[in-house]
């Protein structure tokens, strides 16, 4: 994947969970990286590579000046709020940041003459899909403000593309999990909301129990089914997307998943197997904004980017996360 001529890349939200894994891989591949992050949802302990500018995207002039001085060929945009239930409770917070601040970033990019964007989107744009696996051509019917915010940005990017103002690749993540196989990076959220990390914290005794949000879904065991993708495989997809966008100059929307799903109860049993801890589980009510089943069709990303997953196994995903979590 190495190039003779490295890129200069700006990564917004690059101190976060996914962003830091992408930054590590970019630097390892010889690219020059500037991270723009306000450190609002992370301690920054994951950011071990690249240069950091602590700036909020609402500060458009500061962002513009950073872009103008650094002159990146590509911007990879992660900076967003991501907790679905919180978005239902605080929609304005999500629209202001996820949509409003993305508009400010796009404005700064246009003024600085930067045309290539990799956008961190989400399977939440599909809402409750009519079929699974869900394809990129299926209708967007988000059921949470978080999902709506991602769908809105995708519409903005399509319109800008049609106007000749930008070229982009929107990567629709399914459930991102795992940790750096080398043990250097991993999930460091202030308030983790993802199932695997919450289950591991219950196994460590940092949570008194793990709550399951709903056991009456129309699935074989009554719990939600999700398609989990290892964060390192996802990071590699970003580099492939960057190479493709600069080389081909063609905008794309691509699912990022493995094409198979695991239920909440299956994940819990796998965590118990990996950790050897039979932690307490309690059954709670459904959370707003949770579809019963969400599984990706990954045919398009394999065909267009040549994406080849390396860690396509739930046990490996959980094992890598557990190794990282035990050292914290």
Image (cartoon, rainbow, N blue to C red):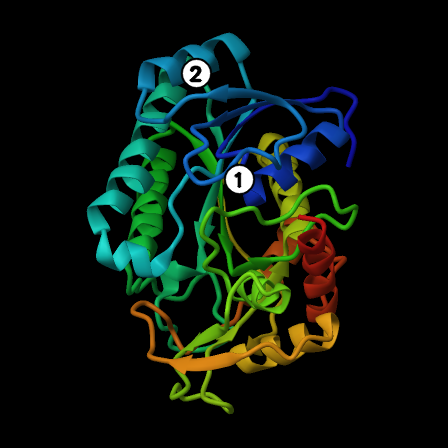
Find the distance from the CA under tag 1 to the CA under tag 2. 26 Å
Q: Earlier in the sequence, mark 1 or mark 2?
A: 1
Q: Which mark is residue 113?
A: 2
Q: Whole-percent x and y of residue 6?
A: 71, 22
Q: Which mark is residue 16?
A: 1
Q: Whole-percent x and y of residue 264?
A: 53, 77
For the residue pair 137 and 191, the one nearer the viewer reads as 191
Element assignment for label 2: loop
Q: Is residue 46 left or right of residue 88?
A: right
Residue at (45, 74) in percent of width and height: 211
Q: Whole-percent x and y of residue 301?
A: 61, 55
- Decide: is 44 above or below 88: above
Element assignment for label 1: loop
For the residue pair 198 and 100, the one nearer the viewer reads as 198
- Decide: is 261 above or below 72: below
Q: Is residue 60 left or right of residue 176?
A: left
The quadrant of the rendering that contains the N terminus is top right
Toward the bottom, the furthest residue is 220
Mark count? 2
């Amino acid at each position: 994947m190495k190039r003779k001529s490295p890129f200069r890349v700006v990564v917004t939200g690059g101190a976060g969970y996914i962003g830091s894994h992408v930054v590590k891989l970019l630097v390892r591949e010889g690219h020059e990286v500037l991270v723009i992050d306000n450190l609002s949802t992370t301690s920054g302990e994951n950011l071990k590579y690249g240069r950091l500018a602590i700036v909020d995207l609402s500060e458009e002039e500061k962002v513009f000046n950073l872009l103008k001085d650094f002159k990146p060929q590509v911007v990879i945009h992660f900076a967003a709020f991501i907790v679905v239930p919180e978005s239902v409770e605080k929609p304005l917070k999500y629209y202001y940041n996820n949509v409003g601040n993305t508009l400010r970033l796009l404005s700064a990019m246009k003024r600085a003459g930067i045309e290539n964007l990799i956008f961190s989107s989400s399977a939440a744009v599909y809402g409750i899909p009519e079929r699974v696996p869900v394809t990129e051509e299926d209708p967007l019917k988000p059921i949470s403000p978080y999902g709506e915010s991602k769908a809105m940005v995708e519409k903005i990017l399509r319109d800008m593309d049609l106007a000749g103002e930008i070229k982009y690749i929107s990567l629709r993540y399914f459930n991102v999990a795992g940790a750096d196989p080398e043990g250097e990076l991993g999930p460091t959220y202030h308030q983790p909301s993802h199932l695997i990390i919450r289950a591991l914290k219950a196994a460590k005794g940092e949570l008194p129990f793990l709550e399951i949000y709903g056991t009456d879904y129309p699935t074989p065991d009554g719990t939600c089914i999700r398609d989990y993708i290892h964060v390192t495989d996802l990071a590699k997809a970003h580099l492939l997307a960057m190479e493709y966008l600069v080389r081909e100059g063609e905008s794309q929307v691509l699912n990022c998943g493995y094409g198979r799903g695991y239920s909440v109860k299956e994940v819990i049993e796998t965590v118990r197997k990996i950790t050897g801890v039979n932690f307490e589980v309690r059954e709670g009510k459904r959370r707003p904004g949770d579809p019963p089943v969400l599984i990706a069709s990954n045919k398009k990303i394999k065909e267009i980017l040549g994406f080849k997953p390396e860690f396509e196994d739930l046990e490996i995903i959980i094992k890598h996360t557990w190794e990282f979590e035990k050292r914290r």
